[in-house]
Image: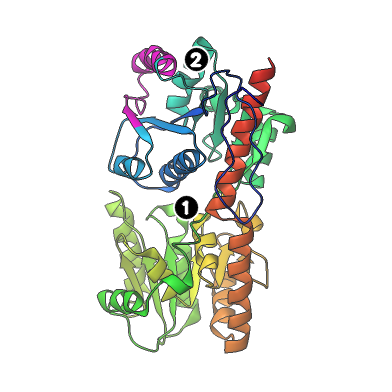
Amino acid sequence: MNDQTDIAKAPQSPEPAADPLPAGREDGRLATILQVIPALGSGGGVERGTVEIAEAIVEAGGRAIVVSAGGAQVHELARVRAEHITLPVDSKNPWVMYANIGRLAQMIRDHNVDLIHARSRAPAWSAYYAARRAGRPFVTTFHGTYNTGNFLKRHYNSVMTRGERVIAISQFIAEHIRRIYGVPASRLRIIHRGVDTYRFDPQKVSAERVVQLANDWRLTDGYPVIMLPGRLTRWKGQIVFIEAVAQLKRRDIRCLIVGGDQGRGEYRRELESLVERHDLGEVVRIVDHCGDMPAAYMLSDVVVSASTDPEAFGRIVVEAQALGRPVVATDHGGARETVIVDETGWLVPPGDPGALAAAMEKVLAMDAGARAALSDAAITNASEHFSKQTMCAKTLDVYNEVLEAAARD
């Protein structure tokens, strides 16, 4: 390790950071890592994770480059002193994807990139062949189950299994990769998505922020609040949630569905009609995008994830626990790994309004002592197992593992 490139240690985290490992160069510089993602516009989980890993690379002393088609989150990269290069890697046009191979390969050589990390399928195809052309190691993160309905779909998805290491964001996703694509465990690394436990810290969410949000949403003082966050799409289970609220037969609660419809106006109208049909107009409200989710969690007495399809990880469930909120989630996918049943929350069968209603009623009936104990356990669970720092440290460990292997070859 005396004269070879290092990625250096990961930033401080609750778990010990990895020791520096060689990256196979002899010029003494620290490693340059290129992440490739379609765009940086939405600020969703994948985009946030990309920025967080870029920040960790820079803090570790390395150089972080992100290639995307651009977007509103590019300024976040500048804030963490990472670099952004705009290329049309969001395109699924075969000719554009082919042209991107040459563009990326040249960029890899020009910037002395040591490792390429792809986070989405369309850009991953270009990045995979560019990495081969430039003779650089290739890593992927598998973020979801994707559609596997036919051979062509499975082949298109398979690029995400072609990394020297394949990062799965949950045990559920790792098992899916092994079962569908036959990736051996030796190439798989499970790194749960991380929550920013500084931002999602109950001590850092002021009462003023919570009161302001409650006023904005015209919530009635003294009424328990049940919240289901997530974009308005059918598999997120908003219909199941409304049916469960109807079964509670209570008028002394306020239930919030928080999330934009992203153009799904017809589905939103369907939800509004269901609310009217159950005469829940005073009880259930559909709220568009919220700019202060920590405050939204803090004003909630119960946080629900009612997804009818398995969540690859389920960020909402962990964010709520980080703030000490009781959670009720569906018993499949990533929630099985993030909820400690009867200690930090409850799991119910998917698509079962009756079971969901019973679990919500159970949480609402908790006394102050039980709620305080659950809050402490939930905060500990999130901070010890699902923090951003842990995610970053483990990802840098993977980079170092791959770079060390490349140095030996």
Read off the residue under disc 2: 129
Q: Position of residue 176 (x, y in %)?
A: 65, 38
The three-letter code of the residue at mark 1 reads Trp
Circle number at residue 171: none
Task: Say what secondary structure mark 1 lies in.
Answer: helix
Observer-nearest residue: 105 or 119? 105
- Which class describes the residues within 10 Å of circle 1: few (<14), some (14-19), or many (20+)? some
Q: Is residue 8 magenta?
A: no
**Residue at point 43%, 71% (across, down):** 204
Q: Is residue 69 left or right of residue 346?
A: left
**Residue at point 59%, 62% (across, down):** 382
Task: Inspect this view and state whether residue 295 appears.
Answer: yes
Q: Position of residue 101 (x, y in %)?
A: 42, 14
Task: Inspect this view and state whether residue 367 appears.
Answer: no
**Residue at point 52%, 35% (across, down):** 147
Task: Say what secondary structure mark 2 lies in.
Answer: helix
Q: Quadrant of residue 6?
A: top right
Circle number at residue 235: 1
Circle nearer the N terminus (2, 1): 2
Q: Which residues are magenta?
A: 84-109
Q: Is residue 106 magenta?
A: yes
Q: Quarter of the image containing the C terminus?
A: top right
- How far is mark 2 from mark 1, CA to CA? 35 Å
- Which class describes the residues within 10 Å of circle 2: few (<14), some (14-19), or many (20+)? some
Q: Is residue 299 above or below residue 42?
A: below
Magenta stretch: dominant SS?
helix
